[in-house]
Amino acid sequence: MDFRLTEEQEALRESVRAFAREVVAPVIGEHYEKHTFPYEVVRQMGKMGLFGLPFPEEHGGMGGDYFALCLALEELARVDSSVAITLEAAISLGAMPIYRFGTAEQQAQWLPKLLSGEALAGFGLTEPGVGSDAGGTQTRAVLDGDEWVINGSKAFITNSGTDITTLVTVTAVTGTRPDGSKELSTIIVPSGTPGFTVAPGYSKVGWNASDTHELTFDDCRVPAGNLLGERGRGFAQFLRILDEGRIAIAALAVGLAQGCVDESIKYAKERHAFGQPIGNYQAIQFKIADMEAKTHIARLAYYDAAARMLAGEPFKRQAAIAKLHASTIAVDNAREATQIHGGYGFMNEYPVARFWRDSKILEIGEGTSEVQRMIIARDLGL
């Protein structure tokens, strides 16, 4: 088994790394502090083809694969997670459901702009009173003639309220199964549809330069043809989307963890105490060594999960392991990097302060750490 990257993969990683350092790093701090969305950065990512990385050229994509997306996410998150999660959600949760389950007409209508980065899409799954228990969905959609009438609300939806958001894919109860359980389906709701309201952005602990909103649907009507995939297959569809997304979130978490290592090394060489750089002290050296070791192992975990996915092999357990471990060590590394920086680690002008604030959500979003443990245990037959 060879985990070395190909020349093409290395070229992609280097180009995204340079973009993150030269374009993202100089502007993201101000966006973060002002809670503004970095439209200029998103436009440039679109021009680079990042939004089309894992999609076929016939749909306007770059002809790459999911692992290419993960490499890009790691390098972006190494500098900033708000930009990284914007790309991750735009692809994994925005465009991917339409690519995986959409009709030819739906793909032709929506994918070109989504894959070029001209438009964004959200994935309306989580609800205010329903977190990990997605089966408890309360939002309902009733077929009235040739229209779906949607009522309900969604919470914490990324990329759902930007000026370039074009649609949200919504999970809703569309009936009752013979066994009495809920029939869940997914429906495309274009931005601006009457009855579809986007609430003001949240005041968040982290990811402050990303777009997150609560959504409300009040007798919101969309054509019956906006059903995404087969009716009643919504639960299976979002499980597939989340399994893939966990690999991407693991890659993002690895990027944040590596960024913590990068900044700690830099600071340890510059900061002097008791007559020498603090990097000369074994206490600091061991902290950074442990951070690097954890990051390396987490990277191998998401590499393995992505390889299994691309090979068409079962990957649910490996994706859960990668997401669980990477998110855990991202929080660990952010805490240690802040400690190494001392008082400066508590100042927002230093990247590690942003890393610290951004890390915790990685243990929650796209399946909490507890949910990952449930998935792993069940896959082991427990």
Image: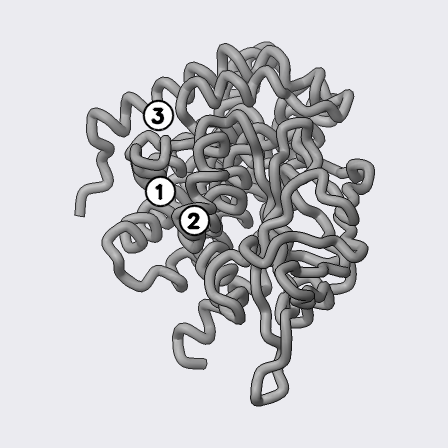
Identify residue for label 2.
247
* Sooner in the amino-acid sequence: mark 1 or mark 2: 1
Residue 349 placed where, x, y %? 70, 17
Q: Is residue 344 left or right of residue 79?
A: right
Q: Which residue is mark 1?
A: 66
Image point (62%, 61%), residue name: 146
Closer to the eye: label 3 or 1 = 1
Spatial CA span between label 2 and label 3: 17 Å
Q: Is residue 257 visible?
A: yes
Q: Residues within 10 Å of mark 1 (few under 14, many from 20)?
A: many
Contact flag, marks 1 and 2 (Cβ < 8 Å): yes
- The kind of residue tagged 2 is Ile
Circle 1 or circle 2, nearest the eye: 1
- Does 363 appear above or below 14? below
Callout 2: few (<14), some (14-19), or many (20+) C-alpha neighbours within 10 Å? many
Query: Residue 343, how many percent across, how many down?
Result: 74, 23
The mark nearer the N terminus, 3 or 1, is 3
Crowding near the residue tagged with mark 3, few <14, some 14–19, many ≥20 C-alpha atoms within 10 Å: many
Question: CA–CA distance between discs 1 and 2?
Answer: 9 Å
Question: How far is disc 3 from disc 1 in space, using C-alphas?
Answer: 14 Å
Q: Is residue 318 above or below residue 60?
A: below
Q: Which residue is mark 3?
A: 13
Q: Secondary structure at mark 2?
A: helix
